[in-house]
Image (spheres, rainbow, N blue to C red):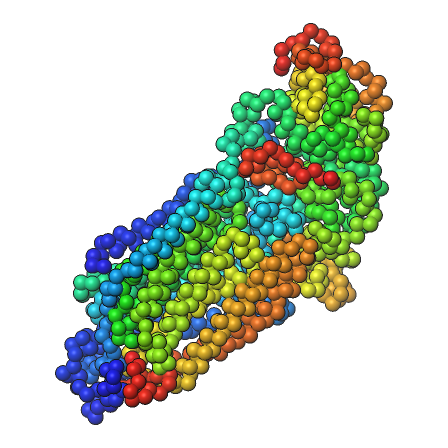
Amino acid sequence: MTEEPKSPAHIGQGMDYGEQADVQQVHAAVQREKREPRVGAEPLSIWLIAIYGLAVFFGGAYLGRYSGNFTGGGLDPMGAPPPAKKTAAGPGGGEQAAELSPHDRGKKIFAANCQTCHQVNGFGVPGQYPPLAGSEFTNGGSRRMGMIVLKGLQGPVKVKGQQYGTAVMQPWDKTLTDQKIADVMTYERSDWGNSASPVTAEQIAALRKELASHPESFTEHDILAAPDQDLPGGAAPKPGEAAKPAEPPKPQG
Amino acid sequence: MNAAGIPIKEPAISAAAGDTEQLERAYIDASTRVPVLMFYTSAMAWLILGTLLAGFVSFKLHSPDLLSDISFLTWGRVRPAHMNVMVYGWASMAGMGTAIWLMARLCRTVLRYPLLLVAGAGFWNLGVLLGVGGILLGDSTGYQWLEFPGYAAIILFVAYTLIASWAVLMFRYRRGEQIYITQWYLLGAFLWFPWIYAAGQLMLFVVPVQGVLQSAVGWWYANNLLFLWFGAIALGTAYYMIPKVIGRPVYSYHLATIGFWSYALFSSWTGMQRLVDGPFPAWMITASIAATILTMIPVATVGLNHHMTMQGYFPLMRYSPTLRFTVFGAMSYTVFSVIGVLISLRSVARYVNFTQASIAYSHLGLYAFFTMVIFGSMYYIVPRLIGREWRYASLIKLHFWASAYGIGLMTLMLLAGGFLQGSSMEDPSLAFSESVETVLPYLRGRSLAGLLLTASHFIFAYHFGLMLLGLGRTSTVPTFLNPVEAEASGGH
Amino acid sequence: MKGLAPLFLGIFGTFAFSWIGLTVVPNWQIGHLNPQSDEEGTDIYPQPQSGMFERGAHVYAANGCIYCHSQQVRADYAAADIERKWGNRRSAPRDYIFEQPVFLGKMRMGQDIANIGARAPAEQASPAPAGAAAPPASPSGGTSPAASVAPQGGAPAAGSPSPPSSPAPQGAAVSSPPSPAPSSSAKVSAASATSPAPNIRAAPTSPVPAAAAASASPAASPSPAAGAPWPVQTAGEPPMYSAAWHHVHLYSPRNIDVDSNMPSYRFLYEKRRIRDTRSADALQLTGSDAPPEGWEIVPSYDAKCLVAYLMSLNQSHPLNEVRSVGGAPAASAPAGSPPASPAPGK
């Protein structure tokens, strides 16, 4: 509002709503305003451009380095890109699993099921979990080993001259298929310096039928009562192995 | 007239023979009066409500048994209610009010179709009301910054369509060749907001994306709201107010251009900085961190531009409320961005993620930067709409200092508390409750800061109310914060 | 800038860049994930939730639980989440494909709860998210004879590391005592009738097997020993993270932990007179929050749904793309390293 003597008539308590039509009386506020802003045209400093270039460069380098190859599966910024091959348990991984050898399949099954107790190096845990590496059961006939894996083992057992007995091995007949048991046994019998005959799914299937009426897990006594032979119908023995196949070698199943 | 050419006495010329530009501006101001005041008044009401809710939130965090048995007052509902009232009620409406006035002034045309804006404001208020009510009654969607239930969100969208149509029409009728810097930012803001809001609503609620992508979209939205809606409005406002008040041109057009485009390019990529180390492909997070670092480019550019523009005129901050608030806000923009970079780096995020530090970051952006700039613009614009000057310089000073100290203390408390909380969480030998114990005293300190902010807002609301009632000062001289000497070089 | 057109184009283009880059492209990459299943098509993880769980998730959203609790476990190279036993592996996108809304969370004024369902005691857990067939479970240290003499029952106050040995129903989760480690959700094989302990999926980072079982069984007083910073099981409280515990925690957090600053959610509960007998749902409250004589506090339907939802939060199932720390590891890690897990107990 200006303070000029002849102010326009306005209604109300001092609000200037009434002066819509009387803008001849320009607000002092508007009058004293500076003009509307305008832009100068100072040139850019070359140093600024250099710093920006550096920033973009380092930003880009960071982006390139820590992005896990820009894949959807690369969750680890520092890691290499995830393996292109999906594993057996992934969707669509079934057919790829079949391309793996029994040994490799067995290794995965071992890792998922047995490793916790028997350890990744097959050494087991003293007093608790017997070792598989160099064990007479693993290296011997596949029958005893198959019995243990299928039906489990409880009670004290002596392996490689050491006594074990505080742990109980669960039966795997309900949890693993014949093929899986065969694969994991094949793996165990050929890794960590072991060299024993591979095991096929048919052999395990036959053993399973044989043991169908035997509900409880075995004890050491039961195991030792069984012949230390390979299961019938097995594959050709590997060179240098100790087990005696009961039948002429058949192609690996 | 004094050295700076500012009339601190009655103008020597009469209006009839006055500058046509002045006349034009006066017409424009008069035409913007009702819509802008509608937005401002609504915003003030939401500010007060939001501040009360904020006090509740802050106190209940360290005194959880306060009024805890009432379902609509439980902390988990009041907190999103506070956030949404502040974001959509106060900040958006005040921002739109300022943007409307700036658009009208810069398009150099009177405000046409005011009904669009009036309807827009009405619907927007309705939407916020329904939304906040919905949250308190248990309809929150669970996504931060998007908690409004669908029935409120759709009303907001309708309201916004009205407002955006107005903006487009104004642009259609603009006069003048040049599109000033502020208009770039405002145009950007008005175009970006509906896009991010629609994308957020569609991708989260209508045709939801799968799994963790919902969280990614949610934080993409939140950060974009902060930068491309609020940040853009505030930067545009600062680009108008600073050169306008001091009467000098902006330092460099080229800096402004680079600042704008790099801002648009990089800030929109920063969303994942809130989800560092989360269950996402590494490249998304790294891209956001890289983008956050690269936002240093617009920050440096805009900061340099403003600084060089203000060069030699900093003493004017002693007198002009607008300048003081705006420069505070603009400087806070730098601080906010630098802190953003720091807390996003993976090595730091390790300690700072999931702590109160992210609250500090949000408030730095929304309050120290956006709200302070808007306060400054309100101090400039309201006298031009009402025809009165602000009544009490002391109240303006109180407002400024209470706000400045309040947000400063809050930031300090939450950043320090957050770091300590995070360090405690990172030490697995400490029980988890240790981290909460560590941060509790800082939360109490934050409540103290909240008291300052509450006082500040009530003071401003009271002052604004006086203006609305026509109880401002009648004067040709603006309300300076400190008396201007005859040979001073300051003024509006 | 003189032209409106370049301005418009620029505004559109710069933003389209981010919208496509941060929302559309990730949608192509991880927006259509399938749950993981093994060769037989069983053991599907994760599975969609429905019914009470879904409603519980909405109660969770409505009451703003997300503002204090997070549901994402960070990798061990990134943070101490796994060391805190909040999970046995980091969270991956596949964990959340059936969640809507997704509650990753941004704040930890309360613990991360991504695996809180996994820590429930055996007989209380909700059906685990995996499929019907018995899984390739590996025995944990619970098979030690010390386990067979372990006390049964709810309160694991004695701290023996064995789970209750009765063949829990398929899908029950097994708990370790509060102190050492959380257990993973387990599927109990019915064939375990004879063995003293059911077959359980190896507890995540359970220091379980040898050492714990052999030496620590009676002692294991749940103190926050190094590596086990859990809140302790307070005497008189329901077993940690059981449904009853959750109800007490929601009704009166300071009953569980006096330093907690979690708000109480009493409006989710009803106070009513005890009819002939105490109802089975009634909360076990002590102290000043206990209802007066003749009254009981029962959860409303929303409270039950919320607790059901909480009990279903379980990300311990191994994923192929993420390495599990300890226990049954995934077959491959993102870095392509061979399946390796730190030997438990070693």
Residue at the outermost bottom position = A5
Q: Pinpoint residue B249: horizontal percent, then vertical percent.
A: 25, 70
Q: Nearer the viewer, residue B187 or B372?
A: B372
Q: Which of C24 and C125 is in front in this view?
A: C24
From the image, which quarter does the N terminus of chain B lie in?
bottom left
* Residue B482 in the image: above or below residue A63: below
* Residue A94 in the image: above or below residue A65: above
Residue A99 seen in the current view = yes
Residue at the outermost front position = A47
From the image, which quarter does the C terminus of chain B lie in?
bottom left
Left or right relative to A45: residue A219: right
Q: Nearer the viewer, residue B82 or B383?
A: B383
| Residue pictured at 46% horizontal, 43% vertical | A65
| Residue pictured at 42% horizontal, 81% vertical | B397
Q: Pinpoint residue B3: horizontal percent, then vertical percent.
A: 25, 84
Residue at the outermost top position = A248
Q: Which of B447 and B297 is in front in this view?
A: B297
Residue B76 seen in the current view = no
Q: How many marks?
A: 0
Left or right relative to B269: residue B162: left
Which image quadrant for residue B429? bottom right
Q: Pinpoint residue B464: horizontal percent, then vertical percent.
A: 38, 79
| Residue pictured at 67% horizontal, 8% vertical | A249
Q: Pinpoint residue B379: horizontal percent, then vertical percent.
A: 35, 77
Left or right relative to A138: residue B232: left
